Amino acid sequence: LDIYAASKLDELKNEPRTFELLPLDQDSQRLDQLLESEIYVYQNVDVMAYGALHQDEIRALFVHPESRGNGIGKALLEFLLLKIKGEACLYVAKSNVSAKALYGAYGFKVTEEFETQYNGVSVLANKMMRID
């Protein structure tokens, strides 16, 4: 919950609107999706990042802001991709340029654009696919 709270709004920082954090334990849709997934953590002394998989979908990849820039996101993404047989997909805010660049470096391509909501505010999002 702490990593999510510290990281979630970063993925929306390039949006033209300001967002208010909806804590994960109060966001029933995202929490339910996370709890039905396989969750993997990256831990040194403390948990620094986590990722979640549900079948071929990467449902979460969050690195605590204090742990960024050390290759943890790449290592966790590579680990998650090893767990997926065949095609992989994920969803990301259209404006989250840094995450999309990371995913693009691993062969993901935008296949769809759609409107969704975060905490009651509309956001454009992308579906990204990786064909193995």
Image: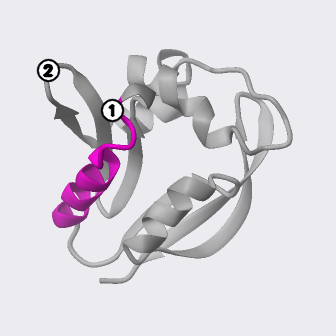
Residue 116, magenta (yes or no) = no
Residue 45's disc is 2
Q: Nearer the viewer, mark 2 or mark 1?
A: 2
Give the quadrant of residue 9.
top right
Left or right relative to 32: residue 56: left
- Taking 34 as reference, is 22 left or right? right
Query: 18 or 111: which is nearer to us?
Result: 18
Per the rendered image, the range of residues in magenta is 67-83
Viewed as shown, does residue 62 lie left or right of 8?
A: left
Q: CA distance from mark 2 to mark 1?
A: 24 Å
Q: Secondary structure at mark 1?
A: helix
Q: Are marks 2 and 1 in contact (CB under 8 Å)?
A: no
Element assignment for label 2: loop
Q: Which residue is mark 1?
A: 35
- Taking 89 as reference, is 97 left or right? right
Toward the viewer: 48 or 125?
48
Crowdedness of circle 1 by 10 Å Cα count: few (<14), some, many (20+)?
Answer: few
Name the residue type under label 1: Leu
Residue 34, image quadrant: top left
Q: Position of residue 67 (x, y in %)?
A: 34, 32
Residue found farthest to the front? 69
Quadrant including the N terminus:
top left
Residue 1 appears in the figure: no
Q: Position of residue 98 (x, y in %)?
A: 55, 55
Q: Main secondary structure of the magenta part?
A: helix
